[in-house]
Image (cartoon, rainbow, N blue to C red):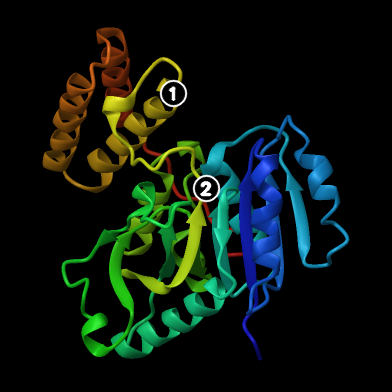
Amino acid sequence: MTDKVAAVVVTYNRVDKLGRVLDSILAQSRSVDLVIVVDNASTDSTPTLLADYQGDPRVEIVRLGTNTGGAGGFAAGMERAYERGADWVWIMDDDCYTDEVALEKLLDGHSAAEVELGRPVPYSCSLVRYTDGSICEMNNPGTAWDWGRLIAKGHNTVLITNCSFVSVLIARRTIAKYGLPLAEYFIWFDDQEYTLRISAEGPGVQVLDSVVTHDMPDNRGVNFGDLNSGNAWKFFYGARNESSYLWHHDNKLEWLTFVLGTYVRMARGGVGRRLQVSVARKILEGIKFNPIPQFPRTVR
């Protein structure tokens, strides 16, 4: 019996890219069994676009009453996929275009890694390119100390400890054991926290033969030196969430390194004093902020 794969796409006001994302998923060489689109209360013409896809029996639209951020959207979509009986949940943003064989290569690479390693692999992710074909700076995964272990055995696969939510394949058993992403994070570092959490018993893998394109405005990673009044709200979430994770689930030295590094980057980037103080407050807020993972309703 073939495993059931559910793709989960979280969207908010990105109607100009969402259709291409969905078309690329529905055209996979290894067909998806279900596509769950979580509409985070979009205020543009997203509902009109999604209406065009409702004739496809594979597509299910989940429209949330309020914008719960990427974290809340993925938690809702992954729970729905789990309740629909998915063996694999394939998650991505609404600006991620998947190559035709991306899913097929992910499944094959994941299975081959498990055989080679002799253990379950909690998740696998694709190689993420920018629109010009270069590596997408935002989506480089964290590598394990023995990252090349599978490459040495002839697999085009890297061992990783964390990754972003841009084409990630998660096993049903992983969700049953470790739960869902922390919806309370809203946005930023929710992907890092989740993949670090589910790597507890062993690294995930990046399958280099599985390729997707992330259509971002600029090919830049997260840098607190880029903080300004227009994007500050995102950095505030990031500061609180990463502070919370490091303080409660890593170690205090790593937390201190994060704090100092954040200050140095803001200073080098010429970030104003008022914004620096606001970031400091969010970092301190993270010490008291420690949400608990939730599980799908049917997990016993």
- Residue 141 sits in which quadrant? bottom left
The crowd level at tag 2 (other Cα within 10 Å; few <14, some 14-19, many 20+) is some
x then y, percent, for residue 144: 22, 66
**Eyeballing the image, is 20 above or below 251?**
below
Residue where numbered disc 2 is placed? 215
Q: Nearer the viewer, residue 136 or 176?
A: 136
Q: Amino acid at mark 1?
A: Asn
Residue 45 makes an appearance in the image: yes
Residue where numbered disc 1 is placed? 231
- Residue drawn where x is 51% and y is 67% of the image: 176
Classify mark 1: helix, strand or loop.
Answer: loop
Q: Nearer the viewer, residue 157 or 176?
A: 157
x then y, percent, for residue 88: 56, 72
**Eyeballing the image, is 114 above or below 262?**
below
x then y, percent, for residue 293: 46, 50
Classify mark 2: helix, strand or loop.
Answer: loop
Distance between mark 2 and mark 1 Cα atoms: 18 Å
**Eyeballing the image, is 63 above or below 160?**
above
The crowd level at tag 1 (other Cα within 10 Å; few <14, some 14-19, many 20+) is few
Identify the mark nearer the N-term, 2 or 1.
Answer: 2
Q: How many circles with numbers are drawn on the protein?
A: 2
Name the quadrant of the N terminus.
bottom right
Position of residue 54 in the picture relative to residue 156 (left or right):
right
Position of residue 58 in the picture relative to residue 90 (left or right):
right
- Residue drawn where x is 56% and y is 42% of the image: 72
- Residue drawn where x is 83% and y is 67% of the image: 57
Q: Nearer the viewer, residue 24 or 264?
A: 24
As drawn, the label of residue 255 is none
